[in-house]
Amino acid sequence: MKNFSGKTVYITGGASGIGLGTGRRLAAMGAHIVVLDFNPTDAAHAALEHARCSPAQHIARYQVDMADRAAVLAAVARAANEAGAPDIVINCAGIGVTGEFASMRFEDFDRVIQVNLYGSRHLCEAVLPLMRARGHGNIVLVASMAGITPVYGYTDYGTSKYAVLGFAECLRYELKPLGIEVQICCPGEVETPMVAAERLIIHPATRALKDAGGSIGIDQAVRELIDGMARGKAIFVLGGKARLTFWLRRLVPPSLWYWITDQIVRKAMKTKKAI
């Protein structure tokens, strides 16, 4: 997938953050953009229309809660009827509630799982018949480095993203023989509105572990995401330090990995107590 011109791209979470940035760049490359978002704002829609290189390109938006299976199925069916079936689907929608498990409400934990994991599942269920009918398609599920490396205070988000990674890897085997590619994108920390809000309440141990993986801006994340798609990579990580962490996690023996990260957490906890 190296030429995006004329392709119809569905992007969940496409009204902000990485989703909006990716939509704008793909629109500038000639793609038709369909946004599926909990809050598909007028500003985001205008930004996408402004980014397109031709007025003939379709820019559409649909309000949907990714945790609601019936709503996802209905929104995708409507989008396919009005804007065309998708060639590419990018699932950027995701939420997180940072905090220690002992003080986390069940409702918050459950909501994260419903949106991040079940939202991925609902989306794939909705688009699969459309792609099978055409004999081709490309699904990009955005997981996270938090689905590869455990992080203090991420029991909800990390659990959901580990699950998304496992779901995507299994699904890839099933769909590849049908001509449908499944790709997994694992960003490190990206400067999105969600991350900005998290910084106001983040635990020092969470911050220390995340610092090891580095942080990148949305523009870099978007460039690397589209590059990973174009190269057809089964799994790709966004950010240089995050890629290094990805490989260390795989190559370093688990006992050594946990010893190193335990030291990082212990030091951060001491710093918090001193404050």
Image (cartoon, grey):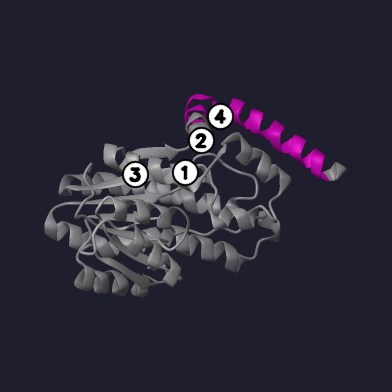
Which one is closest to the eye, mark 1 or mark 3? 3
Q: CA distance from mark 1 to mark 2?
A: 7 Å
Residue 250: image x %, image y %? 47, 29
Q: Amino acid at mark 2?
A: Ala
Task: Name which quarter of the figure residue 91 lies in.
Answer: bottom left
Q: Give the residue drawn at x 60%, y 50%.
A: 154
Q: Give the residue drawn at x 34%, y 39%.
A: 228
* Crowdedness near tag 4: few (<14), some (14–19) or many (≥20) residues, C-alpha within 10 Å: few
Closest to the observer, 8 or 55: 55
Q: Give the residue drawn at x 24%, y 53%.
A: 30
Residue 176: image x %, image y %? 21, 45
- Can you say whether 259 is above or below 89 in the image? above
Q: Residue furthest right?
A: 274
Q: Give the labeled residue for mark 2.
A: 242
Q: Give the labeled residue for mark 4.
A: 254
- Magenta highlight range: 246-272
